Amino acid sequence: MGVSLFALMAPAQAMAQEAAPQQAEATVEEDAGEPVIIVQARRRDEDVQDVPSVINAVTAAEIQNLNLRDFTEVKTLAPGLELNTNANGIGGNARMRGVNFDTNASGNNATVEFYYNDAPISAGVILQQMYDIGQIEVQRGPQGTLRGRASPSGSITITTRKPDLNEFGGFIDATANDIGTLNFKGGLNLPIIEGIAAIRVAGLWDENEADRVRPTTNAVDGRDPFSRTKSGRISALIEPTDWIRLEGSYQYMDRDLRSYDQVESFSVVNPAAPPTTDLLIRAKDRLAIQSDSRLVNQRFDIYNWRAEFSGFGQRLIYQGQHSEQKLHSVEPQDPAVVFPGRSVAQTTDSNAVGESHEIRLQNEERVFDIFDYVIGYFDNTLDSPTDLTRPTAVRLPLVFGGGLASVVQTPISRRGGSHEKSFFGNLTAHIGEATEVSGGLRQIKYKDSSQLIVGGRLLTDNSMDDDKLIYNASIKHNFSPDFLVYASTGSSWRPGLDIVGDFSVAQSALEQSFLHLPPESSKSYEIGFKSTLFDKRMRFNLTAYHQKFENFPYRVPGSGVYFVNTTPTATGPVQNVASFNFVGAVPVEVNGVEGELSYDVTDSWNVGLFASYSLGKIKNGTIPCNDLNNDGVPDPTGPAPTLAQLQAAVGADNLSACVVNQRASFLPPFSATLQSEYDMPISGKLDGFLRGLLSYNGKSQGDPTNDFDDVGDYALLNLFAGVRDPDGQWEVTLFAKNVFNTEKVLTRTTPLFTSYQQITGFTPTGATTTPATTTSSYTGITMTPPQEFGLNFRFAFGSR
């Protein structure tokens, strides 16, 4: 690989030109020479300090300097933001401002909406390896009257690097570390007709060991965890005249993942629990007990296109996108390892196709020297058929060894799709030089259909046809060019949800109420200020907010709630104890504060502190729960009940419900990020630098019924040191992430269990069975990322 890299570098260096250091695409310079971050939060270029809302702008330079490879690492620069991918490969989620989001509960209707080159896209496509990014903007608070789809907590926009019409150039970037990661990125810019047309080609190849959780046994699979991502993107830009701009891109990504579910002996955290009779496992061991690995293959294809026409002081913009997501996964379904060395797995195949179109008209020159406006139409469709096989294990009598007799596979299909249309508009009035008043509306029309077919039988057939008007308004006043205050309010709306994962063919009315939810609505109120001090060397921003939700979808955490599950078989339906993360529609109130303090101590040394406090609480909400003693209070964590115990407690309802007042999110209420960089000239042709990134997470509470999943406060420190060319042509960096090897358990489930059918006898027509459950002495956990030491090399030339 080193020889190959050198071979690439040699001709590139011959073509290298003198150039200024690379800047983020949306970063410009003020007349006074001070850097300004330009954002598109309100669909036009603005200094981030002039926008009346909280925005974290992550530039291309920061992504490179901090060696952010996976998109989930962006959360280290945006306190209060949590980014996760689901182990089963079905999407991912973003959490912000005191509420949770789970794609398995809310599907494509996120609390935080993602945008790829100005078009909405699901989180699962974005929360992958990233490369050749221009800028990322994390905007907090209700969104929807200016951009794409309504989202109550915020939006995250990702802009890829655009082709340069005038200069040939490119870059290569390579990273290797001590825990099995090899990451290579590169890009090439090619002007086709100078000043008129150009293309840009970029690619990525990454191999790593995922979360480094290894199995304790070699039975069935036993191979080490592994992740490989291959991706490529081609972008084109044409500007034949100064009033026409056409651009488009195509990106593919293919990822293969082999992973295991990490466990810990329950007795490690609960001395009253039965001791582990097998291997005592602690969190730091990073081990799994399952016999088989989880296998996931993801393929993404994204087509993005845009056209802009300018004239008479106005601009007409059309933005379109088509995306396809193909998923194939094989997931083990024997958490307690009742059948060691045997494979009991669920196979899932999903093919989601989404398409969006948006056309909008906005001014380039202020109308009557007072007004800025945006009006437009948005159309979005999604079709995501999914097919899976749900296994039911049949166990031999203990006198015959108690092994696996057979696995009965139940075919399950989900069909349906959604169609959202909306008209939107926003008007901003500039009153004098200091005051600005802004307001917007969006009328949403939403249709959805969903069918669930279990064992060839149509189990549910639901449809929705709803509409909603949402609003946003703000006022800001500049007391001076360097100090402004603002206040804003807004509403948001998300359609009702159809939760997928309970495949019982005998669902009760209560059960269905936790599977088919009404629409969610919310209102938010915010006040804050932004200031620039000490001759623009310091920025100090602060905001406070309050938000109320109605029918917020609260998904039960951990292993979920026990319920009576009815499964069809060749000899008739059978019942067993199952668990599922049912969802309750609850009222929630959120209060929070967010702040930023950054200071250029000298021309060579800068420091930035970002902090967030957000607390969301459920107010007298009815949620699904475990309540075996029927006292109306969720039971504390314990082993899975027998079928008879569960039936006695829930009766014909199949599960229990409780009224609660508790936190709505399992994130730490307080989090902060401290970032600093110091540059020093070593010689006329060589600069040195030191960088640091400290991410602090305060104490957090998990499932209130689980006494063992609370998380204490912790901090992760990343350090970087290296040398570079003063003109930014090349850079070599040594880095250490999680320097102090902080090992913290972030989530912990109830004790793992496996449900199955136990053969009790034989008749002339076949075997007779009864439902049974075995509970393990282990719990499932997730942890902070492992410590890593690595080397990064980057070389750039021309337009880069």
Image (cartoon, rainbow, N blue to C red):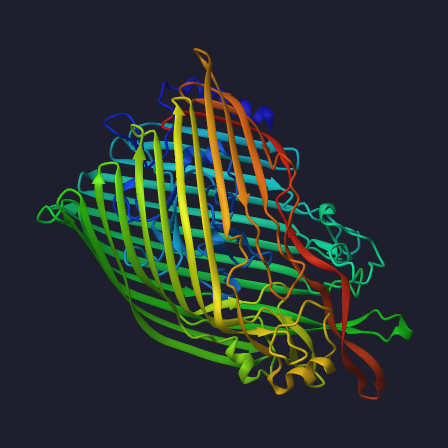
Residue in the picture at 36% in, 18% down: 18
Q: Is residue 534 above or below residue 614?
A: above
Q: Is residue 480 above or below residue 730?
A: below
Q: Is residue 261 above or below residue 677?
A: below
> Left or right of 511: which side holds 247?
left
Locate residue 345, reporting x and y percent: 69, 64
The number of discs equals: 0
In this view, the residue in front, 336 or 168, is 336
User: Which residue is the extreme one toward the right?
Assistant: 399
Locate residue 744, reporting x and y percent: 65, 47
User: Which residue is the extreme one toward the left?
Assistant: 368
Locate residue 483, reporting x and y percent: 26, 39
In the picture, the quarter occupied by the N terminus is: top right
Q: Based on the displayed image, in which of its 4 quarters is residue 719 positioned?
A: top right
In this view, the residue in front, 483 or 730, is 483
Q: Is residue 476 in sight in this rendering?
A: yes
Locate residue 484, reporting x and y percent: 26, 43
Residue in the picture at 28% in, 25% down: 33
User: Which residue is the extreme one toward the top?
Assistant: 684
Q: Based on the displayed image, in which of its 4 quarters is residue 473 positioned?
A: bottom left
Q: Is residue 458 in sight in this rendering?
A: no
In the picture, the quarter occupied by the C terminus is: top left
